[in-house]
Amino acid sequence: MSLAQRLLAAYDAGSLTSLPSAEAATFSVEEGFAVADEVRRLRIARGERPVGYKIGFTNRGIWDRYGVHQPIWGPVWDSTSVLLDGDAATVSLAGLSQPRLEPEIAFGFSSTPRAGMSLAELQDCLEWVAHGFEIVHTHFADWRFTAADTVADFALHGRLRVGPRVALCGWASPADDLAALQVELRCDGRAVDRGLGAIVLDGPLHALRTWIDAMAEHTPGWTVRQGDFVSTGTITDAWPLQPGQTWTTWLSDPRLAPLTLRTEA
């Protein structure tokens, strides 16, 4: 069984497995992406359809906590991701391994971007912006891993719920506005964390541009198509989830809808 097959089996079972970096100390990010590409092909072969990407570890404030000091990324799927009709969702935690919640900003693409774009050129490729929740999880014990491990492990993607989409054509300064965005994360009515958009590689649109350049270098076979959406990384820490919780957000920009997420077993 290949490493990709082993990780996919752990994903399907919601179980833990051993760290690739513990089995081979030289396991590199490039090798992790090769495993992720094999996983991608296996998932497509069994009928899943990629609908975009998630970017992880763009939040510089959590790099030391998790021991990962660079962005990672991976596909999101029609089986894991939903563009919500409203501002609330209920998500089952069944099948997820050590799940945590991240409040993020996502973008929808109207055309394919290219590496080296300016922020203004990138904005012209975007149709909408939205607030979303990503549920991340890992198949490695105690959330301990290397960057290479996380790349192989689905870029930690579990579920993605994207709230009401707002057309970007009406935003004069989206890069600055999203960098200034304040987000408060609440669990069962209690504030647990607060973050600023600028923590995400200077802002979500900046993070998106950085990622497009990195994609061209490290995963040139992965492309962004019209209709794809990309979530740009958590603005707070990632918070452990349990069934029966209600999570909400407060956002400083009234153009973006806050979200409510209820968890169940």
Image: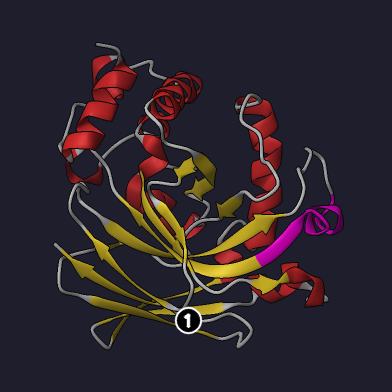
Q: Residue at x 67, y 27 (%)?
A: 217
Does 133 sit above or below residue 16? below
Q: Is residue 145 left or right of residue 41?
A: left
Give residue 219's position: percent from left, percent from top: 60, 27
For the residue pair 91 and 98, the one nearer the viewer reads as: 91
Does 12 sit above or below residue 90? above
Give residue 186's position: percent from left, percent from top: 32, 81
> Can see residue 71?
no
Residue 223, image quadrant: top right
Dot 1 corresponds to which residue?
258
Q: Residue at x 79, y 39 (%)?
A: 114
Q: Is residue 23 left or right of residue 58?
A: left
Which contiguous range is marked in magenta? 118-128
Q: Quadrant of the C terminus?
A: bottom left
Q: Quadrant of the N terminus?
A: top left
Give residue 110's position: percent from left, percent from top: 74, 54
> Can see residue 12?
yes
Q: Is residue 69 left or right of residue 98?
A: right
For the residue pair 32 and 134, the one nearer the viewer reads as: 134
Magenta run includes residue 119: yes
Give residue 205's position: percent from left, percent from top: 68, 60
Neighbor class of circle 1 (other Cα within 10 Å; few <14, some 14-19, many 20+) is: many
